[in-house]
Image (cartoon, grey):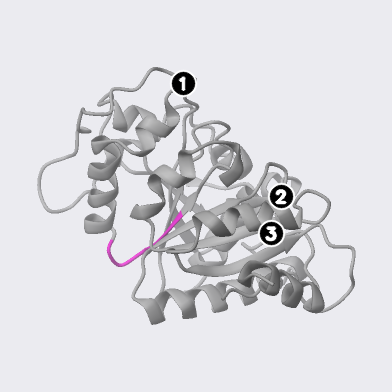
Amino acid sequence: MDSIRQAVNRARSVDNTSAEQGPAPSISPKLPAGPAILDSQIRDLELNPAHLEANRIVAHESADAGGRYYDMLRTQVLHVMDKGGWQFLAVTSATAGCGKTVTACNLALSIARLTERSVLLVDLDMHKPKVAEYLGIGRKEGLLSVLDRRASLSSRIVQACIDKSKLLVLPGEACNSGSSEWMASQAMGTVLQAIKREFRSRIVIFDMPPMLLGDDVISVLPRMDAVLLVAGVGSTSVSDLKQCQKHLQEKPVARVVINKSTDKADGYYGYGY
């Protein structure tokens, strides 16, 4: 039995409930000069708790029962990331409808509640970017405008605030064609290098498209440190997981999360290998 299936079987034993524009990939993005990218262009935005909860984003509140499950996932993911000395975490799924964006947003908010930690959430799904919608940020421009030099990186980042927690968010933009070319482009590499340099004290969570719906994830995977794979009961088959494993043989899987389970137990999060 392959290692992903073993992770899935262990996760089920615990309880895992829900958790445009053609590219010009050779062009480097416009990045601000100087040592600091955090400047006055980054604006604060207060998140609406009711909007978050309507979109199943619950980890901003430690007293919420669902939020506590994400806190347990947070602890395990941070342990793996710290042990490996990793910064970039890709959150993906085999197919659509598994809850990867909900998981990415909740994990980021859970990390943001730790006083000694900071996090940047990047929407890297260039087919159906949903992070801004789920968080209620209301931004129509994001990463793609940085890649094609319409904007600087700092001008597209928002500091989302709720209660005493703050996280940085780089929203996504839909790309009608050539998304995998953008993923593999020099421009993408330059932006990711800038993020690694300027936000080196932060865990960076990338909400990726589903792995088996194209080659976007495969194109950018070498630039990630680790992967959190989200599966959905009724949405993800064992065959899907085997296909994912073929692409993840050389990339650490921090955890496998099983969503939409009807089992009743103490957790929803998966165990990695």
**Circle 3 SS class:** loop
Quadrant of res 232:
bottom right
Q: Is residue 66 above or below residue 206?
A: below
Task: Compare residues 216 and 270 and report the one nearer the observer.
Answer: 216
Q: Position of residue 183 (x, y in %)?
A: 38, 38
- Disc 1 marks which amino acid? Ser
**Circle 2 SS class:** loop
Indicate which disc, 2 or 1, sits on the residue closer to the N terminus.
2
Identify the image quadrant of the N terminus: bottom right
Q: Is residue 124 above or below residue 120?
A: above
Magenta highlight range = 200-205
Indicate which disc, 3 or 2, sits on the residue closer to the N terminus.
3
Circle 3 crowding by C-alpha within 10 Å: few under 14, some 14–19, many from 20: many
**Circle 1 SS class:** loop
Q: Position of residue 172 (x, y in %)?
A: 47, 36
Task: Compare residues 134 and 43 and report the one nearer the observer.
Answer: 134
Circle 2 crowding by C-alpha within 10 Å: few under 14, some 14–19, many from 20: many
Residue under pointer 1:
177
Q: Could you tell whether 65 is left or right of 103 in the image?
A: right
Quadrant of res 4:
bottom right
Residue under pointer 2:
98
